[in-house]
Image: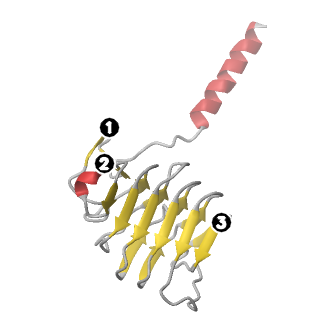
Amino acid sequence: MRFTRVAGLCLLFALLLSTPANAQNVGDYRSTIAVFNWTAASSWEQWDGSTWVQSSSYPGQNPGTGTVTIRNGAVVTINVSPANPIGGLVVGEGTSGILQFDNANRTLNIGSGGVMVNAGGTFQFGNAAQTLTVNGGSVRVNPGGIFQVTSAAPSTTHTPSTSQGAEVLEMTARLISA
């Protein structure tokens, strides 16, 4: 009987050690819960290895940006083409969160972490020539998430495209093209 308990505890311990953790990494950014432009550095928080601290730069302003998370309740407008790629992008934490381009020509480069639009999250493209480049990662729109492409010309055809080994994993939510 004692052997069974010890073996069971050892198995449980081994399973817990083998479960991957969803931890932050130094260089990760998250939005504050506010409405702001991408370049508003004080509206971003950065993981310093132990806690989230107010950032002095915006994601992609400097090399080494990790995963960028748009939090529930935030509305962030991309008003710049960041000089450096970001490692990955998460829009929404399960109930809301909006990332939108302004109506100017912009490019957002994403690394191998890819793009994830969670339930309640919205990633919206505007009426200008806007480019999302995913280098080696994937684009996933989870059920309840929205990947919205609008256009000033209703006859324009929008097709999700990827480059450099990326793939569209799921479009189980709404892809809106107006």
Left or right of 152, for residue 8: right
Image point 48% across, 70% down: which residue? Answer: 124
Does residue 12 show up?
A: yes
Give the answer, above or below, for where 159 lies relative to 94: below
Q: Earlier in the sequence, mark 3 or mark 1?
A: 1
Q: Position of residue 7 (x, y in %)?
A: 71, 19
Quadrant housing the N terminus: top right
Crowd tier of the residue under label 1, counting other residues whose Cα lies within 10 Å: few below 14, some 14–19, many 20 or above: few
Q: CA distance from mark 3 to mark 1?
A: 32 Å
Return the residue at label 3: 170
- Disc 1 residue type? Thr
Give the answer, above or below, for where 15 lies relative to 170: above
Residue 51 is labelled as 1
Q: Position of residue 9 (x, y in %)?
A: 67, 19
Return the residue at label 2: 45
Q: Would you identify the image quadrant in which residue 147 lies?
A: bottom right
| Of residues 71 and 1, the one drawn nearer to the viewer in this rendering | 71
- Disc 3 residue type? Glu
